[in-house]
Image (cartoon, rainbow, N blue to C red):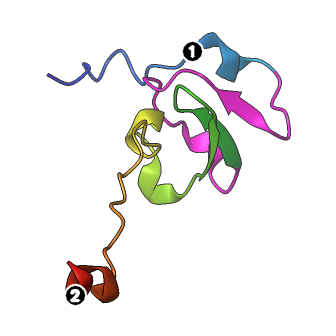
Amino acid sequence: MTRSLWKGYFLENCFFKKAKTNLNVWSRKSSIPSNLIGKTVLVHNGKEFKKLLITREKIGFKFGEFVFTRSKMIKPKKSKSLVKNK
């Protein structure tokens, strides 16, 4: 269920303070406001901060939708020489 229109976007209190050059965002559930277009913000994924460039298409979505918390597991490929020796 989506948020009702009369309430507007959900934003944490950190967005109402003075804008710094590097805006650190811990709140992944906050919506992306339109005053951040063209800026780079650092979004916390639970372990470290990831850079996120805000474009017009990302306005209204949540910060957490663009910064993943899980990394892809890379399986090492076996070389052909090891397979032939067995």
In this rendered view, identify the residue nearer to me: 84 or 29.
Answer: 84
Per the rendered image, the range of residues in magenta is 18-39
Q: Residues within 10 Å of mark 1 (few under 14, many from 20)?
A: few
Chief secondary structure of the magenta span? Answer: loop
Q: Position of residue 61 (x, y in %)?
A: 38, 40
| 69 relative to 85 in the view: left or right | right
Q: Tell me the amino acid under the disc marked 2.
A: Lys
| 73 relative to 84 in the view: left or right | right
Q: Position of residue 11 (x, y in %)?
A: 52, 20
Residue corresponding to mark 2: 84
| 46 relative to 23 in the view: left or right | left
Q: Position of residue 51 (x, y in %)?
A: 64, 48
Residue at 22%, 87% (x, y): give it.
Answer: 84
Q: Which mark is residue 12?
A: 1
Q: Earlier in the sequence, mark 2 or mark 1?
A: 1
Q: Position of residue 67 (x, y in %)?
A: 47, 43
Q: Is residue 82 magenta?
A: no
Q: Tell me the amino acid under the disc marked 1.
A: Glu
Quarter of the figure with residue 41: top right
In what element is the residue under mark 2?
helix
Q: Is residue 23 magenta?
A: yes
Residue at 14%, 22% (x, y): give it.
Answer: 1
